Image (cartoon, rainbow, N blue to C red):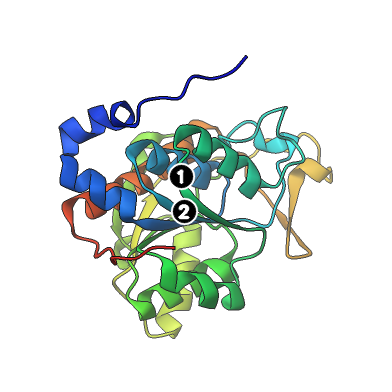
Amino acid sequence: MTSTPCPKQEIWQRTSLLLGEDAIDRLKSSSVGVMGLGGVGTYAAEMLARTGVGGFVLVDFDRVKPSNINRQLTALHSTVGMHKTEALKQRILDINPDARIETHIDFCDQPLRERILPKLDYIIDAIDSLGPKTGLLEDAYNLGIPVISVMGAGGKLDPSKIRQSDLSKSTICPLARRVRKYLKRRGIETGIPVIYSTEKPQPQHDHDAGSEAEWEVDRGRKRGTLGTVGYLPAIMGMWAASVVIRDIASGTAVVPETSF
């Protein structure tokens, strides 16, 4: 069964009615980095694509696993085993065939950041590993690249507890606390907008202690994981996308004349 090409003017018609043609042009010419393609990052990237963002840099080292299906947009039985970057690239191109997409199957470490950050107009930080996350935020801050950082979604159930604030004003979230502590040592106390939850992590039901499902590998080191319900990271990711879209559409974020 072959698909019928969509008239391009129809794809962005509803968005243009709300935001205006100038905003659509700014979104099309922008390049956004989505770092970490889990439950937060995949939903964020999808909303960017459906709103007309034209350029993407997608970073994640991992492949789709069965345990991702409960919360990650691109995780399906048909995509298990695929690199997350490739699964998301295919999905974005199915939404917008004209999208410019650069993928990196890698950790968001210093050498990669040095290569890709100067290309970006905005960054969504959806990384859950402390080292790459804090390194990314420090570099974005020092380079003056707008960034919205999403904190921990694991162990949370109540979407009404989600908040947006400067990192310095975040509370409750253990990941935000660790990020604050690291960046403060680097001389950064304010200026990092974050999305986080004020809900205390829920008690975990450990039915299968020691099983592979209880652990994730972070750069060769095992670390415990928290249970996650699908809608919580999705909401946080879409909220992050809304920040980027509103800033670019309004002209708050400065978009260079040339993009990759």
Q: Say if 39 sits above or below 95 in the image.
A: below
Of the numbered discs in the image, which one, if any, rests on residue 56?
2
Q: Nearer the viewer, residue 36 or 78?
A: 78
Q: Where is residue 197 drawn, in percent x and y? A: 40, 47
Of the numbered discs in the image, which one, if any, rests on residue 45?
1
N-term-proximal mark, 1 vs 2: 1
On the question of residue 201 being in view, the answer is no
Quarter holding residue 82: top right
Q: Amino acid at mark 1?
A: Ala
Q: Say if 203 sits above or below 225 in the image.
A: above
Could you classify mark 2 by the number of other residues whose Cα lies within 10 Å: few (under 14), some (14-19), or many (20 or more)?
A: many
Residue at 18% from the left image edge and 39% from the top image edge: 19
Q: Where is residue 129 drawn, in percent x and y? A: 60, 62
Q: Say if 148 sits above or below 201 in the image.
A: below
Q: Amino acid at mark 2?
A: Phe
Q: Are marks 1 and 2 in contact (CB under 8 Å)?
A: yes
Left or right: where does residue 229 sit relative to residue 100? Answer: right
Q: Nearer the viewer, residue 116 or 73?
A: 116
Residue at 38% from the left image edge and 63% from the top image edge: 259
Left or right: where does residue 76 sit relative to residue 212? Answer: left
